[in-house]
Amino acid sequence: MANDELFQKGLKARKQVLGEKYVAANLAGSDEFMMTFQRAVTELAWGYAWSRPGLDHKTRSILTLGVLAGLGRFQELGIYTNAALNSGVTVDELKPGVRRSWPHMKR
């Protein structure tokens, strides 16, 4: 798959999960240097990892929250909680997943 195709595939998934406004603001706020990183994240994390078959966005979102919590990446939990809700995860589905992560959270 050509890099531009992977970028476009990733951009579509990123917008579906994180929301059009959030992604547009991230891209608009990036200078030429930071666009190198935006492109890499969009191609690899979103075009490759999030777009692979096997798991729907809802399941990927719940897994992502557990990993972020476990790693102590609390600054990202708000972004990905909203992404989970955008992906169809309900608040009632989030609660047990978050509770399950608590014992493993990095402090």
Image: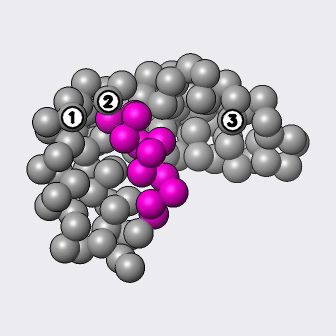
Identity, as a three-letter code, of the amino acid under mark 2 = Leu
46 or 76: nearer the eye? 76
Which label belongs to residue 26? 3
Identity, as a three-letter code, of the amino acid under mark 3 = Asn
The region drawn magenta spans 73-84
Residue under the image location 44 percent in, 60 percent down: 74
Task: Report crowding for label 2: few under 14, some 14 to 19, many 20 or more residues within 10 A (C-alpha).
Answer: some
Residue 66 image-quadrant placement: bottom left
Residue 14, given in percent of the width and then of the height, sits at 50, 31
Q: Are marks 3 and 1 in contact (CB under 8 Å)?
A: no
Mark sitting earlier along the chain (3/1): 3
Residue under the image location 41 percent in, 69 percent down: 72
Which label belongs to residue 85? 2
Mark sitting earlier along the chain (1/2): 2
Quote the CA–CA distance across marks 3 and 2. Answer: 20 Å
Task: Report crowding for label 3: few under 14, some 14 to 19, many 20 or more residues within 10 A (C-alpha).
Answer: few
